[in-house]
């Protein structure tokens, strides 16, 4: 059995620990810990973990690749993430990638994922970043997206007033890009 189920269990355990820290403001401005939501949060995170395992069962329980043939993970993201992990483990910040074209900025490239906290943990803690870990990161992001409880309706309302000003396909693409970045 793959390491993926252990990863899902760790995700569930981390949600339990986060749920223990669930805080709410008091009327006087201080914060108090809310314990009455703990069972619901744990149940929801466990259910979402089971649904994630159910959706990605072939990746987590067999030797299947996601997506078939690797998609963007294999030819683009995996070499970038591997490059970042190797340099960070050597104690250097990879500002420049000499392997692309005649050299290209690496840290400034948003696709490098260099400063994303979850990636940093994986880059620094995983001894040998393999393609399998790239798949685990993708699966983990489905679970965290469900757990993050993003209020998409609020984000939509924030950007809806800008739709009247969009005149080209490029402007619309930029608007959608900004909305997804929320």
Image: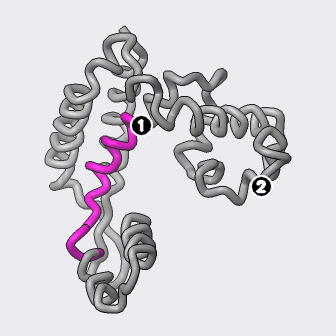
Q: Is residue 178 magenta?
A: no
* Category of crowding for the residue at label 2, using alpha-carbon neighbours closer than 10 angstroms: few (below 14), some (14–19), many (at least 20): few
Residue 16, position as x, y percentages in the image: 30, 41
Do callouts 1 and 2 mark residues in contact (Cβ within 8 Å)?
A: no
67 to the left or right of 122: left
Which residue is found at the position 34% from the left and 29% from the top?
8
Q: Give the range drawn in magenta.
A: 138-155
Above/below status of 137 relative to 149: above
Residue farthest to the front? 168
- Secondary structure beneath label 2: strand
Query: Closer to the N terminus: mark 1 or mark 2?
Result: 2
Which residue was labeled with disc 1?
A: 138
Identified at 36% across, 85% down, the residue is 166
Give percent across and percent down for residue 124. 66, 35
Residue drawn 49% across the image and 22% down it: 132
**Between tags 1 and 2, which lies in front?**
2
Q: For residue 28, which quarter of the picture? A: bottom left
């Amino acid at each position: 059995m793959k390491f993926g189920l252990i990863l899902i269990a760790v995700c569930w355990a981390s949600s339990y620990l986060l749920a223990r820290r669930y805080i709410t403001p008091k009327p006087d401005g201080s914060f108090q810990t809310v314990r009455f939501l703990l069972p619901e949060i744990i149940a929801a995170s466990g259910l979402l973990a089971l649904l994630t395992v159910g959706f990605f069962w072939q990746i987590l329980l067999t030797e299947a690749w996601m997506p078939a043939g690797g998609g963007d993970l294999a030819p683009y993201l995996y070499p970038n993430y591997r490059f970042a992990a190797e340099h960070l483990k050597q104690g250097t910040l990879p500002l420049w990638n000499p392997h692309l074209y005649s050299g290209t900025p690496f840290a400034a490239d948003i696709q490098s994922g260099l400063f994303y906290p979850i990636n940093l943990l994986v880059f620094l803690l995983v001894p040998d970043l393999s393609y399998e870990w790239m798949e685990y990161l993708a699966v983990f992001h489905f679970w965290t997206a469900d757990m993050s409880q993003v209020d998409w309706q609020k984000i939509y309302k924030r950007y809806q007033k800008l739709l009247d000003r969009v005149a080209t396909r490029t402007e619309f693409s930029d608007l959608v890009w900004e909305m997804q970045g929320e």
